[in-house]
């Protein structure tokens, strides 16, 4: 049995060269990949204190493990009991190109020129370590970009390129897009960032097909629609004139089921008005302005016998004033913010603080209900590396949930992820100032903003919860619903992802 000491060092790219011994039989630090197997071949050698290690570009046989990572192995023989792990760790960690290491003792045996190991034990280590290693490497690269450490950037970006893939496992897919964001952050600023991306923006008809695929694969959008519609239906029960104000109507899918429900209300349907605000992305997808959507919803309302009016505002959310909304005395007002508030600039972007201004404006309308659906993560304020880490954790859960529902091979899945998710990720990672529109906040922050604007919580009712449980029956058991003080969270395993709340 031969003792090997594996020292994985973020930032050290080692080359191949196995089975070499130093003077006087001293053990040498030799290169290896994530599976722990060194490869034969040439390479330069570098001293770490009294230890010698290979330097260069590590490569592993894909048939062995498919993972290349910077690491070294300390090769000894059966009599090499004098190996001092702490001395090696200190020597390597003190080297300027190797600021972070971890150590692991693994047993190997020689079989001729080949080296073997306990496959089951080592493979378990590799699988557990693979995700952790890639996350650490991504964080190391993010810190390097943030600190403008060109040496560390030159070392980590190529290594990441070998470990991420749009057809890989969930973290490898996410890693591809986060690296794109880091590279774009280095290369450009503002709108020009997206010119640096590997993929091109699809046409409108293609984009809507990708959005529909995401809608089918994940329950996140449905969760928001079902919970918000349920809260609105309960709040306007018995009202004859209902005015729904939607601050981002997108493709209007949310309102089809509510139109049907209100049309079937005992005692006859109410009169419903929808006032909505468009966004450039949704307009691009549908191939025109809101008149297209208005005609569609009007046709559906007519089919179900619901008196219906549709009013479109040709302004941005930040430009909305109370007079634009056309509220009529006597009508029940319901305001909907579905994945919208986080894109409204706050005090960290502009002194105008439109995020809080819009909430105060809505409160002045005396609405029966305000529904808010938001992603549960913080990418608004705080240091860049903290934002990067939060995004990495959040979207790892998102991509894991997609992986359960769809195979990795079809190009359609890759395109859906690129155009529906990756551009948001790149915006969080690459952009700053007014150009960074994906500025999420956790619910505790929304709670504080709404309370300061004068709102009180309106707990979601039992019928809403029942409908959400029914929805999740069609999806993986890894999805979780949790209720806290009348607010409902949808999560993947133990990670909360979307939160829905109602206010008045």
Image: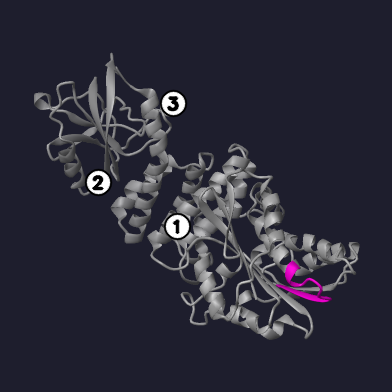
Q: Earlier in the sequence, mark 1 or mark 2?
A: 2
**Label 1 vs label 2: CA separation?**
25 Å
Contact, CB < 8 Å: mark 1 with mark 2? no
Please report the bounds of the magenta region as a residue range. 234-245
Q: Is 49 positioned to the left or the right of 102 in the image?
A: left
- Residue matched to label 2: 98
Can the viewer see residue 287 in this picture? no
Measured from the top left, where is residue 2 in percent x and y?
23, 22
Q: Earlier in the sequence, mark 3 or mark 2?
A: 3
- Give the mark toward the camera: 1 or 2: 1
Q: Residue placed at 38% from the left, 65% from the top?
A: 383
SS class of the residue under badge 3? loop
- Residue 390's tag is 1
Mark 2 burial class by Cα count in 10 Å: few <14, some 14-19, many 20+: some
**Label 3 vs label 1: CA separation?**
33 Å
Quarter of the figure with the N terminus: top left
Magenta span includes 241? yes
Q: Earlier in the sequence, mark 3 or mark 1?
A: 3
Measured from the top left, where is residue 248 in percent x and y?
67, 68
- Residue matched to label 3: 63
């Amino acid at each position: 049995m031969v003792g090997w000491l594996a020292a994985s060092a973020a930032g050290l790219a080692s080359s191949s060269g196995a089975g070499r011994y130093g003077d006087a039989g001293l053990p040498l630090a030799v290169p290896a990949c994530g599976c722990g197997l060194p490869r034969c071949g040439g390479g330069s050698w570098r001293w770490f204190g009294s230890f010698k290690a290979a330097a260069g570009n590590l490569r592993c046989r894909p048939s062995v493990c498919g993972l290349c990572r910077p690491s070294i192995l300390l090769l000894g023989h059966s009599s090499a009991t004098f190996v001092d792990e702490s001395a090696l760790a200190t020597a390597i960690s003190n080297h300027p190109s190797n600021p972070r290491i971890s150590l692991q003792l693994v047993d190997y045996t020689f079989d001729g020129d080949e080296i073997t190991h306990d496959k089951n034990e080592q493979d378990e280590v590799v699988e557990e370590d693979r995700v952790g290693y890639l996350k650490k490497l991504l964080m190391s690269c993010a810190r390097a970009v943030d600190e403008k450490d060109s040496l560390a950037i030159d070392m980590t970006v190529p290594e990441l390129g070998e470990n991420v893939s749009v057809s890989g496992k969930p973290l490898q897919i996410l890693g591809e897009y986060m690296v794109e964001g880091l590279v774009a952050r280095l290369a450009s600023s503002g709108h020009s960032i997206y010119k640096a991306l590997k993929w091109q923006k699809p046409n409108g008809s293609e984009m809507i097909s990708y959005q529909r695929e995401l809608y089918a694969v994940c329950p996140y959008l449905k969760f928001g629609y079902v919970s918000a519609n349920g809260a609105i239906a309960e709040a306007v029960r018995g009202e004859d004139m209902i005015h729904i104000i939607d601050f981002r109507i997108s493709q209007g899918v949310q309102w089809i089921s509510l139109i049907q429900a209100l049309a079937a209300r005992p005692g006859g349907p109410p009169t419903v008005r929808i006032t909505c605000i468009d966004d450039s992305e949704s307009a691009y997808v549908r191939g025109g302005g809101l008149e297209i959507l208005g005609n569609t919803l009007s046709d559906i309302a007519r089919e179900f016998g619901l008196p219906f009016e549709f009013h479109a505002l040709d302004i941005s959310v930040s430009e909305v004033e109370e007079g634009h909304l056309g509220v009529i005395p006597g009508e029940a007002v319901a305001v909907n913010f579905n994945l919208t508030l986080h894109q409204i600039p706050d005090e960290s972007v502009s002194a105008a603080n439109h995020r809080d201004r819009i909430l105060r404006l809505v409160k002045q309308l005396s609405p029966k209900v305000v529904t808010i659906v938001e992603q549960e993560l913080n990418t608004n304020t705080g240091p860049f590396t903290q934002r990067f880490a939060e995004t990495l954790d959040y979207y790892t859960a998102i991509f894991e949930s997609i992986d359960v529902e769809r195979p990795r091979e079809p190009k359609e899945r890759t395109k859906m992820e690129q155009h529906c998710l990756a551009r948001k990720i790149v915006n969080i990672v690459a952009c700053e100032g007014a150009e960074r529109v994906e500025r999420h906040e956790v619910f505790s922050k929304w709670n504080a903003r709404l309370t300061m604007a004068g709102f009180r919580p309106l707990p979601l009712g039992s019928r809403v919860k029942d409908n959400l449980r029914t929805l999740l029956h069609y999806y993986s058991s890894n999805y979780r619903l949790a209720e806290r003080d009348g607010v409902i969270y949808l999560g993947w395993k133990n990670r909360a992802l979307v939160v829905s709340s109602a206010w008045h």
